[in-house]
Amino acid sequence: MHPQQPEPPQPPQPLRPSESERTIGSRDLTDWRSTAGRWLRDSFGALVDRVRNTEVAVLLLLGLSVALAVGGTVLAGEIYEAVSTGHGIARVDEPLLAWILTVRTPELTAAIAAFSNSGGQLYMTIITAVAVTALCLLWRRWTPLVLMLIAVGGSLAMTVAGKRMTERARPALADAVPPYETSASFPSGHSLNSIVIAGMFCYLLVSHLTSTAARAVTVTLTVLYVLAMGLSRVYLGHHWLTDVLAAWSLGVAWLTVVITSHRLWLTQHQDHRLGGHRQVEGGGGDNR
């Protein structure tokens, strides 16, 4: 008898929703409770009917969203540039940096700089690639890779567009901690990319965790990480506070778009599994 050969590792499965992907705790992600949500669900269903392909419909929706996001980034940059003349929230930028200069210590600065550097392009790319690969192999699905590529692609587009169109000056080099940054200040790339990447990991993990405590810890750690990364950029003198606040706002908006698109994709495939339509609340019929 030949010794039993170990089974080779299974490759990730095609991008199709599993039961765990459709729920967060007791919440079904394919259940749209608000009037606006049901309208969005039905409108997306109509778009799918026109193009006859759910994936193409999602890509069209995301493409339009990226265009709007880039435009919104440029507009937000112009608004912040106008505000930076001395009105509104931008009036806290220089006083806050001046206060930070009085509380910096060599030990604290070294620790914050090491943490902040982990959110740079090189280290963040490596960390994200390893984590996404692990999730794909663990869950045997391509979903983490696809969602992360879409999320990161949008955040990078907003970062590049904002910096090139606004050219907002960073704090003076005399007030910054080396190594110095040379690109434009608005928006904060570290802050925008970290909130999008961490937020997407949080969404993926929470949708698979079964423990309420584990989900709460995951969300809490994500929020603390995002806050720490953004504020570290201000402490080091690499960005103004308003650069970070704008990045957080843009990141939350983009995450909302990507997660909503994923929910619409899940809903459409759930509809197909049920026989091509979903029963509407209160009776039978086609929801489209």
Image (cartoon, rainbow, N blue to C red):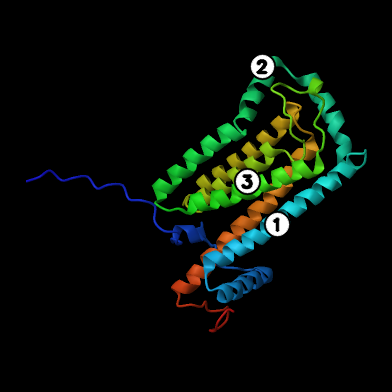
Measured along the vertical axis of the image, is residue 140 above or below residue 16?
above
Q: Which mark is residue 196?
A: 3
Report the quarter where the C terminus lies.
Answer: bottom right
Name, please, the residue furthest toward the left.
1
Is residue 210 placed above or below 113 in the rendered structure? below
Distance between the alpha carbons at the discs numbered 2 and 1 = 43 Å
The residue where tag 2 is placed is 107
Q: Nearer the viewer, residue 281 or 113?
A: 113
Q: How many marks?
A: 3
Q: Which residue sits at x=76%, y=53%?
A: 72
Residue lying at the far right of the rendered structure: 86
- Identify the disc placed on residue 67: 1
Residue closest to the eye, 111 or 16: 16
Along the line of sight, the residue nearer the viewer: 28 or 277: 277
Comes first in the chain, label 3 or label 1: 1
- The amino acid pointed to by label 3 is Val
Which label's residue is closer to the chain start, 2 or 1? 1
Residue visible at 66% across and 24% down in the picture? 113
C-alpha gap between disc 3 and disc 1: 17 Å
Label 3 secondary element: helix
Camera-nearest label, 2 or 3: 3
